[in-house]
Amino acid sequence: MLNYIKSECYRIFHGKEFYCLFAILTALITAMNVITYWFGKLPGFTYANTRFVYSTIDTSMHTFIYIIIVICSVMDGSSMHNLKNSAASGISRKTIYIGRLITQSIICIGMYVILMGFYFLLGKLLMENSGIIAAENFIRSAWVCIPMFLGVIAVYQCCVFLNKNTVSAMVIFITVLVAVPALLRMLGMKFIGIKRVSDLLIYNLLRVEFVETAAGYQRNYTWDTTEGIWKCIMIGIITVVLFTMIGIKYFQKKEIR
């Protein structure tokens, strides 16, 4: 297993695609902060502060599902076509599946932590300080969502391994992780039983509710409470275990071409 993980890391880190993507994401993060900083010099622009730039991210955690698709797809590259060679060399299918899942999880989450740390630092350096609450919300959101992102990676790999082509895999992935939760969320507004199920799905857990109050709109995070934090962690773990078991079971029977 360890040797297979090392070989996967070697393949990824010795390809230019990974570094190109990392550079693009870093450039986008830098551009977001620099543009906001320069607009902050204009009269009447009140958004050049840490509260705004941090909330831009921590209220949009569900969009990272799509970013994870991009990162994992880049790491996959054309390697899916080499599965037959790996299996023929004596590596078990279980080792291949779990090894690739571990590799993608480590690299993807590692990249996420580095980019979020960079974004946080830029906000501190360039923006007006809005106080400790904005920073705490950002840090809490960034860390609590990691187990759910691991669940997203597990679902992605399960879909990719069990489908004949990338297009069908992505359709199923979006359906399972985005379309179905969004539909159940709407139905849950009317049916309490459906709402209980909807509230346990990753896409809905990552969303932030905006509640209108006398003082304006208040953001309600799932992870505002200890119970909410544990819910996010447990749902992430359950998703990883469930889809890994499904993926391994059916990959054992799949014909590799």
Image (cartoon, grey):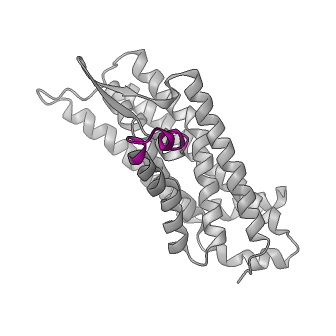
In which quadrant is the C terminus drawn? Answer: bottom right
> In the drawing, does residue 242 fall left or right of residue 224?
right
Residue depicted at 58% across the width and 43% down the height: 148
218 over 93 or under it: above or below:
above
Q: As rendered, which of 235 and 105 lies closer to the eye?
A: 235
Location of residue 55 in the rendering, given as x and y in whole percent from the top left corner:
37, 31
Location of residue 145 in the rendering, given as x and y in whole percent from the top left corner:
55, 37
Which residues, given as a range, are shown in magenta? 187-200
Can see residue 150? Answer: yes
Residue depicted at 85% across the width and 70% down the height: 91
For this orientation, the residue located farthest to the bottom is 257
Marker count (numbered): 0
Can see residue 14? Answer: no
Residue depicted at 50% across the width and 41% down the height: 193
Q: As rendered, which of 69 and 208 lies closer to the eye?
A: 208
Q: As rendered, which of 100 and 202 lies closer to the eye?
A: 202
> In the drawing, does residue 3 fall left or right of residue 121?
right
Location of residue 152 in the rendering, given as x and y in whole percent from the top left corner:
58, 51
The answer to which quarter of the image holds residue 100 is bottom right
218 over 28 or under it: above or below:
above
Residue depicted at 45% across the width and 31% down the height: 120
32 over 167 or under it: above or below:
above
For this orientation, the residue located farthest to the left is 43
Query: Magenta region's main secondary structure?
Result: helix
Task: Verify whether residue 102 appears in magenta.
Answer: no
Location of residue 133 in the rendering, given as x and y in whole percent from the top left corner:
42, 17
131 over 198 or under it: above or below:
above
> In the drawing, does residue 131 fall left or right of residue 72?
left
In which quadrant is the N terminus drawn? Answer: bottom right
